[in-house]
Amino acid sequence: MEIKLQTKRLLIRPVSVSDLEKIHELHSLPETDRFNTLGIPENISQTESIVKDWIEKNEQDKDLTFKVELIENKEFIGLISLIFGKPKFKTAEVWYKFHSDFWNKGYATESLHKILDFGFNELKLHRIEAGCAVDNAGSIRVLEKAGMTREGRKRKVLPLKNGWSDNFEYAILSTDYLISKK
């Protein structure tokens, strides 16, 4: 299934091998790595292995990883993904990573809104979850602006460069989302 999502300013489409260099650049930025557990790749082949895994999962509808581009010039600005839980529970976890040149412009929030809409209205999910390091103020704002509720805190669960970090747990239910859209 070829998925193409669009907002007023953004195109959200499945990642492809042609995105490899841009994804490698994104993963290599110290700013975007600060709160990310992936780490900076040692080389482009390491990134290629990750991208090929995403493509394979996209093709099998196991998980969905998308590139986010600006409509006006098709410029790659980031990634957003849904990782599915067990089908019986109708859940997914969302994660995103945006190039630091595009922070504080509303792109992450806009793409998250679109992914929530897609998850609840097209995929008929019941619950979408997300987590973020407790010091990641930007991501906290994005999750809360999108209507997600902070449900808890896991202690020392994220192995970040500067040591173990606590993680805030966020979620939104389909009923919360549909009410907020009325």
Image (cartoon, rainbow, N blue to C red):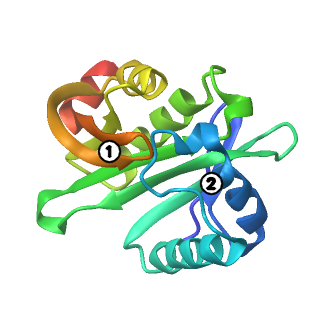
Instruction: Say which of 9 and 81 sits in front.
Output: 81
Give the CA distance from mark 2 to mark 1. Answer: 29 Å
Displayed quadrant of residue 3: bottom right
Would residue 156 be visible to someone looking at this image? yes
**Residue 40: image location, x then y, percent:** 58, 57
Q: Mark 2 or mark 1: name the one nearer the start of the chain.
A: 2
Task: Tell me the residue at 42%/40% (across/down).
Answer: 162
Q: Is residue 171 visible?
A: no
Q: Decide which of 94, 8 is in the foreground and name it.
A: 94
Q: Which mark is residue 27?
A: 2
Q: Image quadrant of residue 116? A: top left
Residue placed most toward the observer, 38 or 80: 38
What kind of residue is marked 1?
Answer: Phe
Q: Amino acid at mark 2?
A: His
Numbered disc 2: secondary structure: helix
Q: Residues within 10 Å of mark 1 (few under 14, many from 20)?
A: many
Task: Using residue 175 as the reference point, say whether residue 63 is left or right of it.
Answer: right
**In the visual, does 2 lie left or right of 168?**
right
Question: On the rendered structure, is 104 left or right of 139?
Answer: right
Rendered residue at 38%/24% (across/down): 140
- For disc 1, the marked residue is 120
Question: Which label lies toward us, 2 or 1?
Answer: 2
Residue 102, given in percent of the width and then of the height, sits at 70, 30
